[in-house]
Image (spheres, helix red, strand yellow):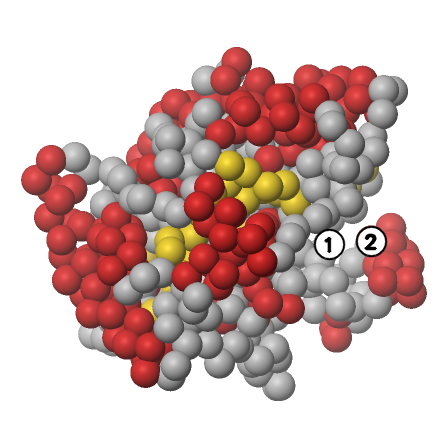
Amino acid sequence: MKNAQGRKSVANGFDFSHGLEGLDADEAAVVRRRQKVLGTMGPLFYNRPLHVISGSGVHLRGADGADYLDCYNNVACVGHSNPHVRQAVADQLGRQNTHSRYLQDEVLDYAERLLATFPGAIDHVAFTNSGSESNDLALRMARVATGHMGVVVTQGAYHGITSLVSSVSPSFGTGLPLAPFLATVRVDDALHDADGLGDGTGDGADGAAASDAVWAVLGPRFNQAFDALEHGGYGVSCVLIDEVMSSDGILPGARGWIARLADAVHARGGLLISDEVQAGFGRMGGVMWGFQRHGAEADIVTMGKPMGNGIPVGGVAYRHPIGDAFAACTRYFNTFGGNPVSMRAAGAVLDEIERLGLVAHARDMGDRLARDLSEILEGHERFGGLRHAGLFLGIDVTDGADDGGAAQPDGAAARAIVNALRDDEHVLISSAGPGDAVLKVRPPLVFDDSDADRLLEAVRHICERGLFDR
């Protein structure tokens, strides 16, 4: 959705311009307090913003006393208030938490564990405070390593909030100028139906055929983008890509096509930067990192949000020649990047991922949700299809056209569904993609069968009320 100035509002955002109509006394009082000190620059979710007072696992407790099933939050990937993470943080706070210019075991312990999850060519890591900082550093490194400035992203991409990174994030709309050295490529039309109702991880001939078909469409587009940057005098420094393409509408299908993209950008002297803020840490099921699903040769991998389960931490893993080139002419220093408390939190997250087998669990639970949700929604007029990889699902909401024309994305209908789930079922999801018409289901990785049962029952209720029908 865009306002009168063309700036894109946050998907499923509370509209401050409508005032406090429809809010109860508690909600209205907290919104007034927030506006007084924070203004309206920072968005809130839902028509009735949720006042959260505590959380545990995949559940959030509201100030209204209700238990809300969190089917959206990838930050607390191993669960809200995870005891193991909490204990690690408390223990380290009782020891020391100073800057990174001292020798410290905590950052080295974590760096060694983290790098062991990557292919051998990615052998060094730098730490930041967020995914935005990680992408900012990665872009700077790519410029130095390649000698070029041009960046290619997908048409609806979001990669962060720093000045540099926001300038290569088209999803912000026209309120922020895009960089002159940016080229964008549309991918949603080619990938929308690439995997039907599956997760796009087909093996053998079927998987190769899907990848071939997608690359037949997208290959020329990316090469045109590379040509444009070269003709403009910028050259090609990198393709920056989120393998789940959340902002483009959740498009994880046709496993393997990003390997072709890596080869294509390498042929132009550029790098593949894999933005794993949303796709990484097992989220996409069966593999730790999104680029691994595609068999792609990533040069730099960026990380953020779920890395510390809510404790601010980010990272940039890279092939060491890239870092050596950067270090030869400049330096990178971050006071809090790699601080001991964040490193202990991140280490505890890896502990839980390994202990609970969450990489395989994300695959199995995601497959179950995709299958059962498709069965419930099939036949309802506004259901336009479902795509998923692991515990990241996108459900298309359309206008259910009955005039002989093709059904179109319906952001208003999607918003009604999201808010009905929040208000009446106490289930939290959001929306994404063109027109904000794709329901975004992305729960913590510890989501279990009883949680799935509750989500499915909530969706049945929504269908019974006719929200998926014209």
Name the residue: 66% across, 56% down. Answer: 45
Type of residue at label 1?
A: Pro
Q: Is residue 327 visible?
A: yes
Q: Are marks 2 and 1 in contact (CB under 8 Å)?
A: yes
Residue 122 image-quadrant placement: top left
Type of residue at label 2?
A: Glu
Q: Is residue 343 above or below residue 296?
A: above
Q: Is residue 74 above or below residue 228?
A: above
Name the residue: 73% across, 19% down. Answer: 88
Q: Is residue 368 visible?
A: no
- Quadrant of the image for the C terminus? bottom left
Task: Tell me the SS state at disc 2.
Answer: helix
Query: Mark 1 sits on what residue?
Result: 49
Query: Mark 2 sits on what residue?
Result: 27
The mark found on residue 245 in the picture is none
Q: Is residue 83 above or below residue 30?
A: above
Task: Please identify the residue farthest to the front as the structure is shown.
Answer: 328
Q: Is residue 80 left or right of residue 124?
A: right
Q: CA distance from mark 2 to mark 1?
A: 7 Å
Task: Tell me the SS state at disc 1.
Answer: loop
Name the residue: 71% across, 32% down. Answer: 342
* Between 216 and 50, the one nearer to me in the picture: 216
Q: Tell me the crowding category of disc 1: few under 14, some 14 to 19, or many 20 or more residues within 10 angstroms, Cα based.
A: some
* Between 369 and 349, the one nearer to me in the picture: 349
Name the residue: 58% across, 29% down. Answer: 111
For marks 2 and 1, the one nearer the N-term is: 2
- Quadrant of the image for the N terminus? bottom right
Horizontal and vertical percent position of residue 132: 61, 55
